[in-house]
């Protein structure tokens, strides 16, 4: 199963304050452990929301673009990891070892194509899901 581990933003990350050298070293060690275990698929930090934008979609209307920064820090992200592990409990155990300076993280399971099988009723839907699977395979190979 794939999981996305989301790093919540805080006032420092939103102010664009970079981690210290010590924090970078500690995080590097943690990431190295994830890599050596073969469970890390991706992981990155994100710039402050002041450098971002949001697009809101409303049926029947044009999309609305709002430039950052965004007011509610508690709703923002500062980074992420994408990992592949056997269970949510495994992810929790691994990330309990994360350097504490990261603050707060959220763990969410990523949908797999098979999760949508109960709602796919058309040939077009099956073809779309097959194309999505092929895309993921190509993306994983870097094609």
Image (tube, helix red, strand yellow):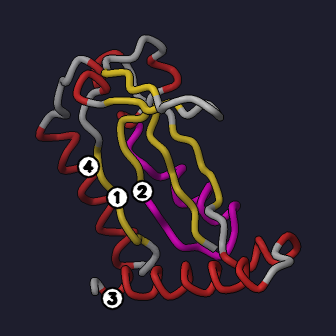
C-alpha gap between disc 4 and disc 3:
29 Å
Q: Which residue bears the numbered disc 4? A: 26
C-alpha gap between disc 1 and disc 3:
17 Å
At label 3, counting other C-alpha atoms closer than 10 Å, the crowd grade (few under 14, some 14-19, many 20 or more) is: few
Going by the picture, which residue comes out furthest to the front?
60
Q: Which residue bears the numbered disc 2? A: 81
Badge 2 or badge 1: first in the primary sequence: 1
C-alpha gap between disc 2 and disc 1:
4 Å
Is 7 rendered above or below residue 33?
A: above
- Please provide the residue range marked out in magenta: 81-100
Badge 2 or badge 4: first in the primary sequence: 4
Frontmost residue, 42 versus 34: 42
Quarter of the image with the N terminus is bottom right
Q: Residue at x 55, y 78 (%)?
A: 132
Residue 98 painted magenta: yes
Is 128 rendered above or below residue 119?
A: below
User: Which SS class for mark 3?
Assistant: helix
């Amino acid at each position: 199963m794939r999981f996305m581990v989301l790093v919540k933003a805080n006032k420092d990350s939103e102010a664009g304050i970079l981690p210290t050298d010590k924090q970078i070293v500690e995080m590097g060690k943690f990431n190295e452990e994830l890599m050596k275990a073969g469970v890390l698929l991706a992981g990155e930090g994100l710039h402050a929301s002041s450098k971002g934008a949001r697009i809101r979609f409303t049926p029947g209307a044009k999309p609305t673009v709002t430039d950052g920064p965004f007011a509610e820090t508690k709703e923002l992200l500062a980074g992420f990891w994408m990992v592949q592990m056997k269970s949510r409990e495994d992810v929790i155990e691994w990330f309990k070892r994360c350097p504490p300076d990261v603050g707060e993280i959220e763990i969410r399971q990523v949908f797999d194509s098979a999760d949508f099988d109960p709602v796919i009723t058309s040939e077009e839907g099956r073809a779309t899901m097959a194309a999505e699977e092929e895309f993921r395979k190509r993306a994983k190979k870097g094609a």
